[in-house]
Amino acid sequence: MSTFSEFLQNETIRYLSGQPPLDTPQTFIIESIPEPEAVPVLKGKDLRYVPARDEQLRGGAPVEAAELEWPPAAADPGILTTYDCNQCGLTWLCGNAGEDAGEKHPQHAALSTSHDDTRATRSILVYVSGAARQRGNAAGKMAVGAFFAQTSHFNVAESFSGVDGPAGGVTNHKAEVMAVGRVLEDVRKRVLPQYRGMLDYTPGLGEVRTRLQMKYLRVIIATESEYLVESMEKLGGVWRVAGGDRVVLDRKGKEVDVKNAAQFLTIKQEAEMLAAAGVQVVYYLVQKKFNKTAAGGAKAALG
Ligand SMILES: [Zn+2]
């Protein structure tokens, strides 16, 4: 017996021949958990992660950006309590639900809430950095470093292939944007399938709606790039790339030139695909000295 439909078929045969039903194997019950519904794509100031306004830390409604000094200064992420899970290979935010809840694998809840709530009640923290090297008129190189957790197989320290070119096209800003695009793609293609698979096949996690709730996630991208965070806030509307680097901000009907538009568009598209899968992305501006592991990975990958 290898599939749920085969199991049902065999059960039907048993029923028709008058035999008693078998106990449904736990794995087949778990397999029927639906995937999360789409969540809104965050825009504007909602894209910026600020601990002082975070619902998952406070337990209450999120604080409006207008009530805070804006833009917030680059932060020391040490004020957050987190849990580095070596089974997930992910760093989880411990929030209002308490450290015990945050450290409990595979649940890792930050916010306690009712089962029917489809808000993300858990967050992973990922440190991301991009690096670029120019040598006069010689070909430049760009690389990405990402830190998901200690000894995590999701960690990245790689140069971007196929983007080496004239030094003019290689910048630190572009590398920072490409790095985030690459990490979001990794979250979608590698992290989510692994984590959700753990939830599907871990027995004793509760009823279907409790398990479904665990699949809604928030990804906090920690970056030292003010350029990246500020640009994401500005580009949060409806926009598209029209020829080269030109971006049209449709909400205002106004065309503006934006550097690295194609790279920002990749981030936007990845964030949309993640939102369709129940995952929201926010950006956390941290001081450079707290992003050394990711930055070191990117620099090492430059060779
Ligand atoms: Zn875990």
Image: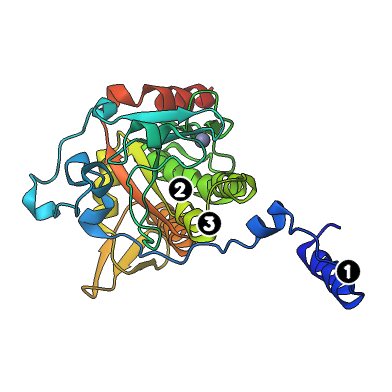
| Circle 1: residue type | Gln
Q: Depth-wise, is mark 3 or mark 1 nearer the camera?
A: 1
Q: Going from the N terminus, do you reach mark 3 or mark 2 first?
A: 2
Q: Depth-wise, is mark 3 or mark 2 nearer the camera?
A: 3
Callout 1: helix, strand or loop?
loop
Between 260 and 231, the one lying in front of the other is 231
Residue 181 disc label: 2
Q: Residue furthest bottom?
A: 16
Residue 16 is situated, as x and y percent measured from the top left of the image, at 88, 78
Between 232 and 82, the one lying in front of the other is 82
Contact (Cβ within 8 Å) of mark 1 with mark 2: no
Residue 22, quarter of the rendered image: bottom right
In the image, the residue with mark 2 has its CB under 8 Å from the nearest atom of ligand 1: no
Where is 107 relative to 145, above or below? below
User: What is the spatial separation of the Cα atoms under label 3 and label 1, in whole angstroms?
Assistant: 28 Å
Residue 116 is situated, as x and y percent measured from the top left of the image, at 39, 63
Residue 127, quarter of the rendered image: top left
Residue 19 disc label: 1
Residue 207 disc label: 3
